[in-house]
Amino acid sequence: MNLKQREMRVIRSDQIRARALHDADRLREALALIADIAEGSTTANSLPNIARIARAALVGAEPADPRLSAEPAKH
């Protein structure tokens, strides 16, 4: 493997890692919201809301591009 191929593999691995971390954060937030709904409700009416949140959490979402953000970058 030459240096350019190695560099491209490292960049791709960093992108995959960033995407996985973004997805993990989204799923953690969704699970916390589902837990709040489930604990706070005693009716079956909350089940459609839980299902909607779960479906939305499973749909892939692109991480925000830090170059387009108005907020300062976190280091």
Image (spheres, rainbow, N blue to C red):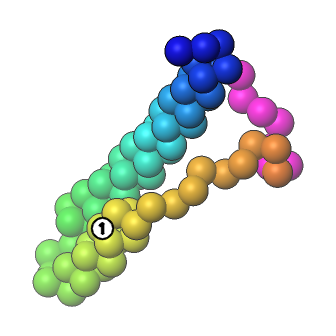
Residue 75, placed above or below residue 52: above
Q: Quadrant of residue 15?
A: top right
From the viewer's perspective, tell me whether residue 11 is left or right of residue 43: right
Q: Depth check: 52 or 62 in front?
A: 62
Q: Secondary structure at mark 1?
A: helix
Residue 41, position in %: x, y? 21, 73
x then y, percent, for residue 30: 37, 58
Can residue 68 be seen at all in this image of the molecule? yes
**Between 20 and 29, the one nearer to me in the picture:** 20
Residue 10 percent location from the top left of the image: 57, 22
Q: Residue at x 49, y 37 (%)?
A: 16
| Crowding at mark 1 (Cα within 10 Å: few <14, some 14-19, many 20+) | some
Q: Is residue 36 left or right of residue 7?
A: left
Left or right, 18 with reference to 43: right
Residue 40 appears in the picture as rendered: no
Total marks placed: 1
The one nearer the camera, 2 or 43, is: 2
Q: Which residue is mark 1?
A: 54
Q: Is residue 11 magenta?
A: no
| Residue appearing at x 21%, y 86% in the figure | 45
Question: Residue 47's spot in the image, x, y percent?
Answer: 20, 79
Magenta segment boundaries in residue numbering: 69-75
Label the magenta part by its dominant secondary structure: loop
The residue at 75%/43% (across/down) is 66
Where does the C terminus fall, quadrant-wise?
Answer: top right
Vertical relation: 20 (above or below) 48: above
Residue kind at label 1, given as amino acid type? Ala
Inspect the magenta stretch and tell me whether residue 71 lies in it.
yes
Residue at the spot 44% in from the left edge and 48% down from the top edge: 23
Q: Is residue 27 left or right of residue 44?
A: right
